[in-house]
Amino acid sequence: MARTDTTHDAFWSKPGKEPWRAAQQPPERRRKRQPQRRRARGGLGTGVRNTDARGADVRGTDLRDGARPRAADTRATRATREDLKPLDTRLLDARLPDPHGSVPPPPPAVPPAHGARRHGARRASRAPHVRDRRARRSLFGASDRMGTGAMVLSVVVGLAMLAIVERSLLGGPATGPNRQAGAERGLADRRPRDGAPARSRPSAAPPGPAAPAPAAPPGPDLRRLAADVRVATVNERGPAARAEYGVPSVRTPLVTVDRTSRDRTWAFGTTAIPVPAGSRAVPQIAFFAARWTVRDGWRTALSGTPAFTAIAAGLPAAVMSAGEGRALVRFSALSAGRAPAAAAADRLMLPWRAGTAWAMDTADFGRPLSALSFSGGDGVVRAAAGGRLYRFCGAGLLMIVHDSGLASAYDGLHAPTALRDGSAVGRGDVLGRTGTARPCGGAPLTHAQVGFTLRRGDGSVPLDGVGLGGWVFRETGAPPAGRAERGPLQVLPGGLLANLGPVPAATAPPDPAPTGDAGDAGDDPSPAPEASADGAAAGAPLDKEPEQ
Amino acid sequence: MKTRSSDDPLLPSWVLRAVIVGALAVLAGAATPPGAALAGGAQSFLSYYAGVFTLLALTAAVVFGLLATDRLILGIRQRVVAQAAHRAASVLAFTFVVAHLLVKVLGGLAAPAQIVVPAVGPVGLGTLAFDLLLVVLATGALRARFARRARPWVWRTLHSLAYVSWPLGIAHGLTAGRAAAPWVTLSYVLCLGAVALAVLTRSIAGVRPRQVRRAGEDVAAPAPLRTRGTAPAARAAGARGEAVR
């Protein structure tokens, strides 16, 4: 019965179950132990005694005096007597019926005394034992429950892992909303991409947008995806591009598949229609999101369409984080009417160091404020506001999707930043240097500059009425001309424009008076220098408080 | 009193059968579309939370393990419960760290080599913590063996690697992945401080060498109180304890 396996077991083993301890106790208590009673009943004819003990309840009161001598038997003497015996006999004694009890002559008189004493003794000395046992049971129950709970939870997690591993091994087009899709931008290929297009850029190779893959392969095919995206780009953006570029047909779109899920059934990337060499138009660019299913093949959607919202919202988290997906959905859904308010909400500044002045030029085609170009200063182009960075046409055209959904695009950068697509940038972060590169095509440039446009999901946002860096840009005049205004100050194309930082455009409410009398002076470039000088002078004290 | 003996099998035999049946059911179910959806949901959930659960379980394991050694405040029973909680939390920590690694590797967010080979960076911290955790868990599982070979100090030294692994894991959790909320950072820092304090207390209070008691000696100590016997009885009880052992 003695268990010696661990220290704790010995701690917790019941003293009554130890034979030697049972032997040490007074005989009348010894007999109450369950196992001993069973042994006694089987072996040595104490059945009579037991019946006597039962009968004791009837006669117990008047015969109590007979018990007194037994109870008065001092425990010390009995203990010493017991201790003198060798262990074996003590163990034997524990099994035998009570020797003291059987020797005294009046057998019927003794057991009632046992019974009377037993009840008292149990109440007095065994109550703590019972409490102990209960406490112990609850304690061990708590321990066992904890261990069992941990094991059960582990098994559940293990089963879940089994399912996950199976799904990822099966791969292929699963139908779950959020499959075990790994980001292709794993840690292994997380490297800066400067200049050269790093990912699959099949735009240069296949000639036509309608070049289909020979046969539908069993799994998703990224070349097929690029072809599909090209077709979609030409279909959706082609008319606008032809009108803006002034050409009857457009060239093959530049498609970059930026990310795919591990099983290649989800994809996200960028597309752009290159500008012809003779035009200085703003390139048409868009994001695309695509999903491949066995039944439908690739389903692609360009930003600015409801389908894009649907697919982008379903992109697995491993391809695109939820926050990024929401930002792109906002970008895609931004309407033209809300664009100026969005610019104000983003507190856009001009794309260079606040407090310095660069030369401004407006577009020389279409609407003058469809695009701006800036040059001069230290040549370092900076983010107009915080957001997420993406690149188009390889790497030369950067676009930052701001929190409101409005995006600012920076064209023709030299040495653009090596941040990954989707990286978060803050206002004023360096994006690159002004340059003469034309990554999306177009007429060559004569001097280093950065082309600046605002974008929303399905096209560019005219800068008319938009506040940037404390200035409000306006188109006025019969042949429309663009200018920047701030209160009484104006900057005309070719003039120096001071970046006042992220000053809310509300501080410079559009004033119709200077707009009216400046309208006839719009084609005269001579007032521009002093106006810009004023602007720069005014900018110096102002840029202190909003410096980021 | 039903307490599990260490000789009993760890689990009832039907548990293994139930687990096997469940595994087969899961394998079959994950091949169906709704099962795939569920598996995807489980994966995204685990990808997001397995690391957090690992850190929580590891924190609990360290705290309860430390509590179980405390002899200043807690009684024996509380210490036994603390030890059970320590074991349960350790099992959970191991489960979740394995789930964390598997999900991250399957999701393409970590290279398989990064599980074992530490590198510089936030992920490398986690790798280092995991390696140390393996040692700690191995010693925890082989505790009885260490104790029987009478080399408790080896075990104690190896097992106290947890005090290195756990802060590394917390540093990994706070630096890698998404940014932690301020209250999360604060809780971990408080936890680290409390544990550091407790370890300091333990190292100071534990200077006195522990008396390693064998089974019989343990029962010998309370014997005089229970039997209210005389001195020879107590002495004899000690002798009997030896005999029983």
Image (cartoon, helix red, strand yellow):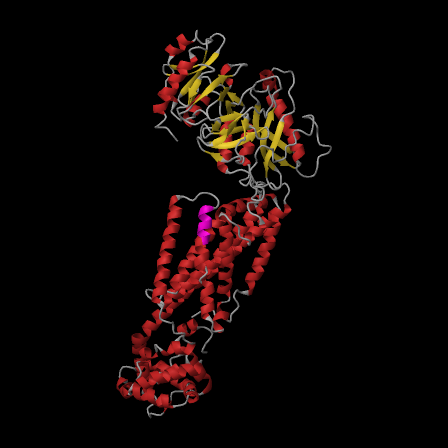
Q: Residue A135, image x and y in percent? A: 36, 67
User: Does residue A458 show up magenta in the picture?
Assistant: no
Camera-side residue of B128 and A77: B128
Whether the magenta-drawn stretch holds residue B171 is answered as: yes
Residue A148 versus residue B166: which sits nearer the camera? B166
Q: How many marks?
A: 0
Question: x, y percentage for residue A134?
Answer: 37, 68
Q: Is residue A468 left or right of residue B131?
A: left
Work out whether A69 lies above or below A139. below
Residue in view at x 58 percent, y 50 percent: B112
Res A2 seen here:
yes
Residue A260: quadrant of the picture:
top right
Name the residue rendered at 56%, 59% in the picture: B18
- Is residue A160 visible in the rendered image? The answer is no
Residue at x 40%, y 58% (from the top left corner): B63
Q: Which residues are magenta?
A: B168-175
- Percent x, y for residue A156? 52, 54
Q: On the rendered structure, is B193 left or right of A161?
A: left
Residue nearer the viewer, A328 or A60: A328
Split into 4 quadrants, where in the image is the N terminus of chain B?
A: bottom left
Residue at screen point 40% across, 11% down = A515
Image quarter where the C terminus of chain B lies is bottom left
| Quadrant hosting residue A532 | top left
Q: Position of residue B61 (x, y in %)?
A: 43, 58
- Judge by depth and name the residue closer to the eye, A128 or A389: A389
Q: Is residue A506 above or below residue B119?
A: above
**In the rendered view, would you say B205 is above or below A36?**
above
Secondary structure of the magenta portion, mostly? helix
- Is B10 rendered above or below residue B96? below
